[in-house]
Every structure is written in structure tokens, then in C-alpha cells.
Image: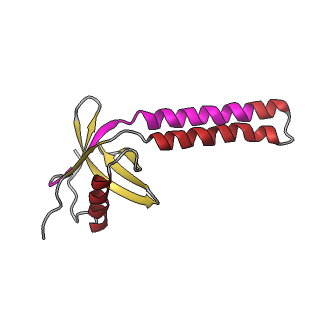
Amino acid sequence: MKSAPPIAFDYRPSRAVIAATCAIALAAAATPWRSALPVAACGVLSVLAVLLALAALTRFARPGFVRIAHGAAGWTLLDRAGREHPALLVGHRRLGAMLVLDWRHDRRAHFRAVLVPDNLDAQTRRRLVLLLARGQPAQPAPIA
């Protein structure tokens, strides 16, 4: 059986996901004002919605890894400082045009990448989907 060709791509957060999150946060901040709650409660809920969205967007917009690669040795994540981290793909999910990949690296640390058409080219996406459809290897490489 032929081995899969290596896959490597730069990872950057999706602008579409960021824009959708901002729109949802604005809707969540405006919603309490359409209710019969007191003005103080509406203000607190609006501020809370905005703060939670900002926290989530900050984590999403500055990912710990900038490059993802798969080769004969398995998955490798490259951080901003240029260090390679062997990783184990622990889960993947396809939600319409969105592909969500979950990795474990450095024993307990996790990294989730959200891939949509604006942050991954079509050819790499097809190759990645085919690789994921083939399944995970029976004996993944140990994480150092």
C-alpha cells in the first residue's frame, strides 16, 4: 500500500470565522435590550457578551502554531518561534465547508485548527480530507 504524500500548510485563523463571531457577539450584546430586564441587567449582560467574545477571539486570532505538517513520521506542529512539536491527531470533524482538527502535543496540551476555504487552498484541503478518510495509523508515534 502506498503511503500518503506529505501534507504541509501554513495555518492562519479564518477571517470569515472572526467576522461571524463578531456578528454573533454584537447580536448577543443587543439581545438583552429587547427584553423587559432592568437597564442595569441589560448593561451587565451586554458587557459580559462582548468580553467573552473578545476573550475567545483573542485565543482564536493568535494560535500557538503557524504551520501544520504530516509526513512519514506523523503530524508536526510548528510554533511561532520555529520549534517543531510532534503531535497526535486525536479528532477531526467536518461541518459543511468547515474542517476542525484536534491535536494533542507535549503530553497534555491541545491545539484545535479550524479550516475553511479562506485559510486553506482547495487542493491541500482535498488531500487532507482524503488522508483523514483513510483513518489514523494503528500505532501513532509517541509524543515526547
Q: Main secondary structure of the magenta part?
A: helix
Image position, residue 21 (x, y; %): 56, 41
The extreme bottom residue here reads: 1
Give the residue drawn at x 51%, y 35%. Answer: 57
Q: Is residue 93 left or right of residue 133?
A: right
**Above or below 141: residue 134:** below
Give the residue drawn at x 79%, y 37%. Answer: 33
The mark tally for this picture is 0
Q: Nearer the viewer, residue 38 or 9?
A: 9
Quarter of the image containing the N terminus? bottom left
Give the residue drawn at x 28%, y 35%. Answer: 79
Q: Is residue 17 left or right of residue 35?
A: left
As for residue 50 lying within the magenta part, the answer is yes
Image position, residue 100 (x, y; %): 41, 53
**Above or below 8: residue 62:** above
Image position, residue 25 (x, y; %): 62, 39
Q: Is residue 77 visible?
A: yes
Q: Is residue 69 visible?
A: no
Give the residue drawn at x 26%, y 61%. Answer: 131
The extreme left residue here reads: 2
Name the image colouring: secondary structure
As for residue 71 lying within the magenta part, the answer is yes
Residue interval drawn in magenta? 44-72
**Above or below 127: residue 144:** above
**Above or below 139: residue 14:** above
Quarter of the image containing the C terminus? top left
Q: Nearer the viewer, residue 129 or 77?
A: 129
